[in-house]
Image (tube, helix red, strand yellow):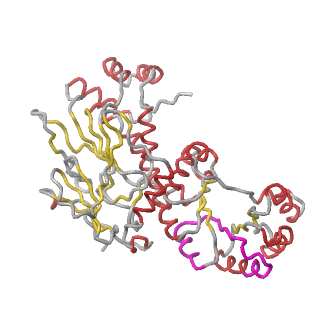
Amino acid sequence: MNTSTALLTDHYELTMLQASLADGTAQRRSVFELFARRLPDGRRYGVVAGVNRLLDALEQFRFDEQAIAFLADRGVVDQVTRDWLADYRFSGDIAGYADGEIFFPGSPVLVVESSFAEAVLLETVFLSILNHDSAVASAASRMTWWAGGRPCIEMGSRRTHEEAAVASALAAYIAGFATTSNLEAARRYGIPSAGTSAHSFTLLHDTEKEAFTSQVDALGKRTTLLVDTYDVAEAVRTAIEITGPELGAVRLDSGDLPSLAGQVREQLDALGATKTRIIVTSDLDEFQIAALAPAPVDGYGVGTSLVTGSGYPTCGFVYKLVAREDASGELLPVAKKSPDKMSIGGRKWALRRRTTAGVAEAELIGVGSRPEDDGDDRELLRPLVKGGEIVGRTTPAESQAHHLKVRDELPRFASQLSRGEPALPTQYVGDFAAQNPFAPRSHT
C-alpha cells in the first residue's frame, strides 16, 4: 500500500513550484500562516485538532517513484521540477497551537517557516486535516461542555467517509468524548471503545426476552440493553427480570427523550435498579444535550451531528504567505488586501492574556517585540518541527487533558449556544493594531 501523502494536494501547488524554480524565487525564505478569519455563526470559540495527524502526514510527504511517474505521465510539471520533487524533504520549522487548544479569529494556529518551495506544497494537506478535525473537535467541545461530566460516546462512523470516521473519533476524544464505537480509531490511537447491540439483534430473536437473555449470557449483567424496539416499559421490566438490579444500563434511541428518561428512571428505581444507568442516543447534538441536562440521563451517544461539525463541517482555515525574504535577506511582511479576505503580514507570536484568577481575557497577537508579561499570559505557539525534525507530538490523552484545562480558562459565557461574538477578542499589538480585520462584526 502506498503511504505517501505527497499527492494529497492541488495541481496548482506544483505549477507554482515549477514557475518559482524557473525564476529563482523558490528558495526565498518564507513564512506561511494558517488561520481562520472568523468563527461560524453562533460559535464562541474553536478547538484545534489534527496537529498530530498533520505531523504524521508531513513525515510521509515524499514524492516516490509512483508519484513522480504519475506527474510525468500527466505532464503536470517539467523534468527539472520532477527532479527537485524526488529529493523533497521538509527542512524548515513549524510552530503551532497544540491539539486541544482553543482558537479565535486571526489566531496563528500554524506558522510554517522554510523556503517558499518547501512550504507552498504543504498548503492543501495541512488545510484538509486541520479544517476537518478542528470542525469536529469544535462541535464535540460544545457537546461535552453541556454534558456536564456525563460521558459522551462517539458513534458517527456510518455517517462519514471511512477514514474521516477514524479522524473524527480522535478529534472527538481530544475534545472530551470518553469512548468511540470505531475499532480502527481504538487500534490506531488507543482510544477506549464501546458498544453492545443494535435493534437488529432484538429483531433477530423470537422475543425480546430471548434477545436480552442472549446478550446478558454473552456480555454479562453490566451490559447495556436497548429497550425501545417495541414497548419501552415492558422492555425495562423484562430487562430487570433477567438481570436483577445489577443491569449496567439501558439505552433509549427514540421518542421524547427528556420525558421518557424520567419515566424509565422512575421505573428502574421502583424495580430496585437504582444504579442502572440511562444512555440516550438518536441524532443528538449540543442543543439536545443541553435540553437533556435536567433529565436523569447518565450518558450520550452522538453520531451524525458530531462527524459533520454540527452544521459546520469546516473551520474556514486558510494558509497564507505573511512574510518572505527581501533582497537584503531580511523578512519582509506581506499581506493580502482583498476586501473581506484580508490578512496581516509578519511572523506572529500569540499569547492568551489571563486575569490573576486565570480567566482568559484576550487573544493577544503581534509581530516583533512583546508586551511585558505580568505572569498570567500563556504562550500559544509551540515548536512542532525544528530543522525538519518533528519535536512536538502529543498523545491523545495529553491532548484531551490540555483541552479540558484550557477550556476551563474561558469565561463562563463561552458555553452559550445562542448567537454571539467570540468569547475573547483578538487584539493586535504594535503598528498594525488598527488594521485588525478580525474585530467583531455587526449582526444588524
Tell me, yes or no, whether the highlighted magenta stretch contains residue 277: yes
Q: Position of residue 3 (x, y in %)?
A: 51, 30
Seen as rendered, the residue at the extreme front is 375
Give the mark count: 0
298 sits to left or right of 215? left
417 sits to left or right of 327? right
Q: Which of 22 and 385 is in front in this view?
A: 385
Q: Where is residue 150 in the image (x, y as percent from the top left)?
A: 58, 68
275 versus 428 height, above or below: below
Magenta region, residue range: 266-294
Name the residue located 25 percent from the left edge and 42 percent from the top edge.
321
27 versus 251 height, above or below: above
152 versus 265 height, above or below: above
Residue 326 visible in the current orientation: yes
Seen as rendered, the residue at the extreme left is 328
Displayed quadrant of residue 386? top left
Tell me, yes or no, whether the highlighted magenta stretch contains residue 152: no
Q: Where is residue 306 in the image (x, y as percent from the top left)?
A: 54, 59
Name the residue located 77 percent from the left edge and 73 percent from the top edge.
232
